[in-house]
């Protein structure tokens, strides 16, 4: 298998050192090479096969002088029979394979029984001799020209753990044997095509440069494509040239398992950053419960066949939350016209990778008909049912809030959670139907309109609170009364609101006081620099008359829906009367109402957990999963070791680059990595097309045929950079709020890093946003995000505040920095770099 793979690679022009094969009794001749040193490697027939992978169990001799090659060959042959346990497995594997190929498996079983009977009467020495002959019959040894590389290692085209979207390179100095045997310090490169490249490890190891990495990953992709399997590839770099020493299939991957595709589109709004175990498991319970209810509504008795899918709607990976999008596709496939609906859903949710994967068989025609009828029915009645759900939730929320406030016993608080889950989730699945209505109606309407949504109510309430603080002061009774009213209604609405561990205005009122003080200070600064501030805002709105009328002291959040209506053109007023507009407005509004109720539901759970923590182990309770919390409360099990482990894991995951999408086999995760981690630049090949589309077949000299062309492109790119602003850089995303604005970028990785005042007049740049960002966006003049969709909270709020916004620009956080000057077009979804800040 080893030699056969090398022959195939050689035939296809890959850079393979010259080699020959010799059998046991064959005369060894080295006329194929003028080298003085050789590598003598095993080439056992069952080695590296799919059923029998025993790599490394046979002898390999390196740095063998020409006159010692024959002796080394015999040593390798002797190693084939060195282990009685392996000898038996290898014989059985080879015999079964040969006979199966000839259609004689049954004959083999009879022969084997007969031979076993005969062997019982033979002496042990005679048995060893016979078995050795059987083992060595037809086997060969590989003799290969010896390289003396500066660097060598192993490339896995798929992470052997089961992370299918990752390529891994383990690199060491000198010969690769020390790397394989873990006797040498190594560097490990983790490459997620189209996502990121980072290096793990430190020390004296000289790493790979960008050209070497690009060539190596390209070779890996071509070799995988050639063999149509994930590959384990040994390589060496001698005098700047990459050689392939060995290529075998990664036999530890069970490719028969269904692939899981995790995607953080949209979900990163509500679960930004690292999530603790309790939040992960609680979110999983909520999503599973809601979709199970939806399944009962549409599938009836057939719901049991989808129970496993409903359990996998969301999942955690490296401490972050993801949609298990492969499960969502299985459910969407049940809908009528799913081929048309799925692309709409992808666009509205902000799914940038349009690859679709199903784990379930295609639903039957009759099932699709049943679902189609029910879908039409619920499409029609969805708005009425959403109003009923709103009324139902408000009644239940008041009741549960009172019970949680009055209860002091930890176990009873947990029982309230169980009761609340069953009660509130019973009808909540109608919100999913409403989401589909909003996706479809908004897509068909096709306008970036500001529907008078619930999203603005917290903004207006916060503006009122700020006005009271400005007039009466934070120590006044009027302020305390207004603050209590705001917290009662919107105290859970903050950045990361669905992460239970997030501290909200309800759990820590000082956070709200600090925000109000910050906002008031910003107003004072604005008054001092009125002309400049006015110019920025006027430019953002692009309407001089309205700007002068409103004046700078009026908070934009205080504009109500009537003003939005007055600003509409006559054609837009006519469109408001259309059924499609009303449906889009109603469904989007109800979507925001249900999301606010969801925030309150999670806030209620947060209060339950906080009170349980007060009675038990404090904040550490958030490092337990729901099932562990139950076991802790009702059986008293000690989870201190597990909690300590989870804390260290989260610290480690904080250091790893964020992935927007990952493909997995089974439940696996990235290694947390204790060593040094460095994110690398990979400008010339970070888009997958640069690897697959621009790299030609390797030439006869073993190097890539168009390496010179690629280097020319890189030099051209460097010249563009050196030219500074001579060439405008343009990035394309999704325009979600109309308007054009040119201004300074403020890059935000965490809201804790900045004060609200810093956002004034800037274009905010972030991975994603959530409802907790509205005070900052209110101060800003525009928005750019890596993630997001037309129905993201940030998009909706930007439209309400009339701030131009472009979302879903891949890798924009890497491309821009605070201080860069850009122009964003919220209609076309374009971000143009006007001037970049000097580094």
Image: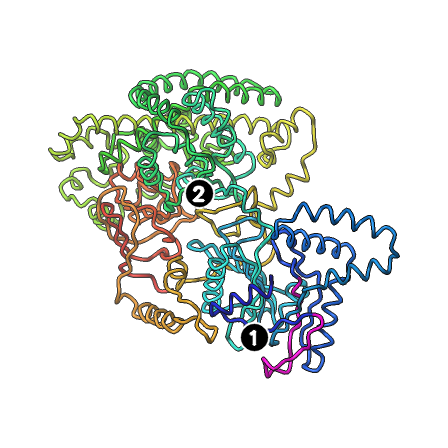
Residue hosting label 1: 18
Residue under the image location 55 percent in, 53 percent down: 159
* Label 2 crowd (10 A; few <14 / some 14-19 / many >=20): many
**Left or right of 553 on screen, residue 93:** right
Which quadrant of the rendered structure holds the C terminus? bottom left
Which quadrant of the rendered structure holds the N terminus? bottom right
Q: Position of residue 528 (x, y in %)?
A: 27, 47
Q: Is residue 477 visible?
A: no
Q: Nearer the viewer, residue 436 or 187?
A: 436
Image position of 136 with respect to 424: above or below: below
Disc 1 on helix, strand or loop? loop
Which quarter of the figure has residue 494?
Answer: top left
Q: Position of residue 744 (x, y in %)?
A: 30, 54
Residue 263's disc number: 2
367 part of magenta stretch: no
Please report the bounds of the magenta region as a residue range: 24-44
**Left or right of 648 on screen, residue 527:** left
Q: Position of residue 458 (x, y in %)?
A: 34, 30
Q: Nearer the viewer, residue 333 or 598?
A: 333
**Left or right of 175 on screen, residue 365:** left
Q: CA distance from mark 2 to mark 1?
A: 45 Å
* Label 1 crowd (10 A; few <14 / some 14-19 / many >=20): some
Residue under the image location 44 percent in, 24 percent down: 295
């Amino acid at each position: 298998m080893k030699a056969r793979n090398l022959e195939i690679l050689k035939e296809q022009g890959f850079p393979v050192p010259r080699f020959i094969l010799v059998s046991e009794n064959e005369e060894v001749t080295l006329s194929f090479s003028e080298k003085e040193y050789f590598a003598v490697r095993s080439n056992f027939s069952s080695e590296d096969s799919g059923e029998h992978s025993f790599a490394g169990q046979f002898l390999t001799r390196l740095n063998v002088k020409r006159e010692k090659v024959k002796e080394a060959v015999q040593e390798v042959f002797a190693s084939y029979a060195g282990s009685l346990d392996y000898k038996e497995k290898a014989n059985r594997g080879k015999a079964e394979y040969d006979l199966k190929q000839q259609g004689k498996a049954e004959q083999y079983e009879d022969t084997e029984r007969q031979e076993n009977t005969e062997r019982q009467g033979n002496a042990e020495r005679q048995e060893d001799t016979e078995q050795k002959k059987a083992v060595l019959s037809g086997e060969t040894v590989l003799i290969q020209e010896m390289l003396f590389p500066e660097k060598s290692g192993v490339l896995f085209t798929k992470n052997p753990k089961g992370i299918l979207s990752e390529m891994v390179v383990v690199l060491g100095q000198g010969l690769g044997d020390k790397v394989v045997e873990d006797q040498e310090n190594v560097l490990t490169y983790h490459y997620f095509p189209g996502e990121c490249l980072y290096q793990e490890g430190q020390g004296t190891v000289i790493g790979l440069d960008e050209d070497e990495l690009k060539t190596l990953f390209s070779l890996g992709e071509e070799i995988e494509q050639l063999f149509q399997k994930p590959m384990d590839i040994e390589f060496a770099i001698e005098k700047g040239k990459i050689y392939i020493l060995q290529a075998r299939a990664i036999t530890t991957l069970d490719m028969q398992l269904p692939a899981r595709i995790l995607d953080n589109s949209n979900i990163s709004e509500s679960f930004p950053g690292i999530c603790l175990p309790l939040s992960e498991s609680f979110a999983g319970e909520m999503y599973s419960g809601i979709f199970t209810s939806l399944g009962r509504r549409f599938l009836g008795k057939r719901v049991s066949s989808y129970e496993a899918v409903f359990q996998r709607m969301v999942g955690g990976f490296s401490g972050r939350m993801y949609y298990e999008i492969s499960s969502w596709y299985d459910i969407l496939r049940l809908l009528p016209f799913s081929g048309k609906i799925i692309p709409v859903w992808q666009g509205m949710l902000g799914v940038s990778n349009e690859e679709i994967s199903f784990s379930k068989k295609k639903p039957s025609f009759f099932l699709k008909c049943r679902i189609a009828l029910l879908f039409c029915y619920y499409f029609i009645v969805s708005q009425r049912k959403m109003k009923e759900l709103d009324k139902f939730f408000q009644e239940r929320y008041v009741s549960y809030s009172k019970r949680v406030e009055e209860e002091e016993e930890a176990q009873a608080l947990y029982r309230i959670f169980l009761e609340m889950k069953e009660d509130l989730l019973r009808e909540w699945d109608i919100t999913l139907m409403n989401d589909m209505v909003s996706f479809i109606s908004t897509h068909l309407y096709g306008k970036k309109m500001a529907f008078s949504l619930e999203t603005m109510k917290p903004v207006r309430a916060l503006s009122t609170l700020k006005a009271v603080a400005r007039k009466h002061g934070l120590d006044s009774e009027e302020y305390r009364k207004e603050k209590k009213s705001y917290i009662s209604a919107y105290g859970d609405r903050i950045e990361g609101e669905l992460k239970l561990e997030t501290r909200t205005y309800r759990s820590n009122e000082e956070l709200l006081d600090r925000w109000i003080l910050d906002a008031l200070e910003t107003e004072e600064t604005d008054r001092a620099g009125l002309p400049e501030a006015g110019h920025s805002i006027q430019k953002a709105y692009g309407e001089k008359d309205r700007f002068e009328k409103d004046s700078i002291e009026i908070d934009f959040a205080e504009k109500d829906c009537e003003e939005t209506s007055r600003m509409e053109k006559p054609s837009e007023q006519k469109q408001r009367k259309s059924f499609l507009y009303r449906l889009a407005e109603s469904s989007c509004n109800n979507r925001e109402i249900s999301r606010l109720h969801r925030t309150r539901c999670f806030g209620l759970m947060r209060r339950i957990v906080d009170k349980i923590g007060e009675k038990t182990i404090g904040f550490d309770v958030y490092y337990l999963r729901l099932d562990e919390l139950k076991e802790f409360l009702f059986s008293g099990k000690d989870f201190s070791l597990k909690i300590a482990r989870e804390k260290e894991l989260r610290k480690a995951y904080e250091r790893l680059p964020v992935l927007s999408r990952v493909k997995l086999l089974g439940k696996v995760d990235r290694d947390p990595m204790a060593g040094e981690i460095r994110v690398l630049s990979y400008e010339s090949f970070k888009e997958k097309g640069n690897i697959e589309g621009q790299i030609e077949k390797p030439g006869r000299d073993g190097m890539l045929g168009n390496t010179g062309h690629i280097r020319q492109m890189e030099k051209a790119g460097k010249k563009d950079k050196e030219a500074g602003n001579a060439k405008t850089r343009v990035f394309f995303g999704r325009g979600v709020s109309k308007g054009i604005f040119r201004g300074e970028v403020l890059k935000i990785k965490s809201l804790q890093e900045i004060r609200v005042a810093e956002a004034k007049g800037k274009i905010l740049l972030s991975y994603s946003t959530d409802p907790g960002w509205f005070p900052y966006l209110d101060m800003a003049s525009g928005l750019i995000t890596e993630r997001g969709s037309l129905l993201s909270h940030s998009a909706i709020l930007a439209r309400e505040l009339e701030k131009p916004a472009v979302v879903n620009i891949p890798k924009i956080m890497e491309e821009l920095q605070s201080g860069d000057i850009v122009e964003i077009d919220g209609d076309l979804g374009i971000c143009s770099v006007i001037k970049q800040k000097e580094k």
